Image (spheres, helix red, strand yellow):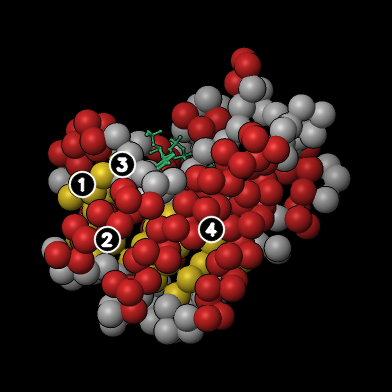
């Protein structure tokens, strides 16, 4: 049985990823920073719950203990993420963004991913087929953001895309260091969730598809790459 942890899985794309991986036969731990929301989601899904705030060392350490005691971990999906929004849910552009806003977004999206990955490495190293999926974004792609005429080019935010570019670099460096693990970054696509005030054009089923595919990577599958449902994406 493959055991999988998905951070930030009490709602949105993470919740749907849990649903699809359970259907595929994984034993799934959903991570939720809020115990009550997590209990409700886990009950609806038939998943196991671990309370986990990716910005909190103690919370992550406790989650490692819980999952280790229950038998270990094969697949880690670093899904928890936030976007910086201003009043009226506006994306914060270069004229307004502050170092403090950048720090907040990086704390969850980048340092959270590293904190959780670092803490679960010993468990993943004991797995016969370890996999890490880092949920990035098409907005991480420097080539896409620089291509006039695309939706990505028109996105004005700074903190969120910069954080996801950092996630991509973290992905590549970890993939090189741990060749026995499949470690990839994925772009779910613009998906209707609370993250974007439910303005996304895809369903969560569509958004979760590439995460699920990479979470089910074979031992000889790709590693150190950046993928959407349509295939590999340029950095
Ligand atoms: P969402 O519905 O807002 O879900 C985000 C999840 O992350 C929630 O469960 C949230 O928990 C959790 N979270 C936030 N901070 C956390 C923390 N410190 N510790 C633990 N969990 C935390 O957004 P989503 O669209 O499903 O986003 C999932 C991932 O997809 C994110 O990494 C996002 O950047 C990425 N993504 C989304 C889109 C899109 O169009 N939606 C596109 C590309 C990439 P709470 O409920 O407690 O807030």
Can you tell which of label 4 and label 1 is closer to the viewer?
A: 1
Residue 64 circle label: 2
The structure residue drawn at horizontal position 65% and vertical position 35%, both measured from the top left corner, is 100
The structure residue drawn at horizontal position 22% and vertical position 31%, both measured from the top left corner, is 36
Regarding residue 213, the answer to whether it shows in the image is no
Label 4 or label 1, whichever comes before in sequence order = 1
- Real-space CA distance between mark 4 and mark 2, rounded to the nearest whole angstrom: 24 Å
Q: Name the residue tied to disc 3.
A: 32
- Real-space CA distance between mark 3 and mark 4, rounded to the nearest whole angstrom: 21 Å
Q: Name the residue tied to disc 1.
A: 49
CB atoms at circles 3 and 1 under 8 Å apart?
yes
Instruction: Mark 2: give few (<14), some (14-19) or many (20+) Cα within 10 Å.
Output: many
Q: CB of residue at label 3: within 8 Å of ligand 1?
A: yes
CB atoms at circles 4 and 1 under 8 Å apart?
no
Q: Residue furthest right?
A: 148
Label 1 or label 2, whichever comes before in sequence order = 1
Q: Residue furthest front?
A: 58
Can you tell which of label 1 and label 2 is closer to the viewer?
A: 2
- On the image, the x and y values in percent for residue 27 come to 20, 60
């Amino acid at each position: 049985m493959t055991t999988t942890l998905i951070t930030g899985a009490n709602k949105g794309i993470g919740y749907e990823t849990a649903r699809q991986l359970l259907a595929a036969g994984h034993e799934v731990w959903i991570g939720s920073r809020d115990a009550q929301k997590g209990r409700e989601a886990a009950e609806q899904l038939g998943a196991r719950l671990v309370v986990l705030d990716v910005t909190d060392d103690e919370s992550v350490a406790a989650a490692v203990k819980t999952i280790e005691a229950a038998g270990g971990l094969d697949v880690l999906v670093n899904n928890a993420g936030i976007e910086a929004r201003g009043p009226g849910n506006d994306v914060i552009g270069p004229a307004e963004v502050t170092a403090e806003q950048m720090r907040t977004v990086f704390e969850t999206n980048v340092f959270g991913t590293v904190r959780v990955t670092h803490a679960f490495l010993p468990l993943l190293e004991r797995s016969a087929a370890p996999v890490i999926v880092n949920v990035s974004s098409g907005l991480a792609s420097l080539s896409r953001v620089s291509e006039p005429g695309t939706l990505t080019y028109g996105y004005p935010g700074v903190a969120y895309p910069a954080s996801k570019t950092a996630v991509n670099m973290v992905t590549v460096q970890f993939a090189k260091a741990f060749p026995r693990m499949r470690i990839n970054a994925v772009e779910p696509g613009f998906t209707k969730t609370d993250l974007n005030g439910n303005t996304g054009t895809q369903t969560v089923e569509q958004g979760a598809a590439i995460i699920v595919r990479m979470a089910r990577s074979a031992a000889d599958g790709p590693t150190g790459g950046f993928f959407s449902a349509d295939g590999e994406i340029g950095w």
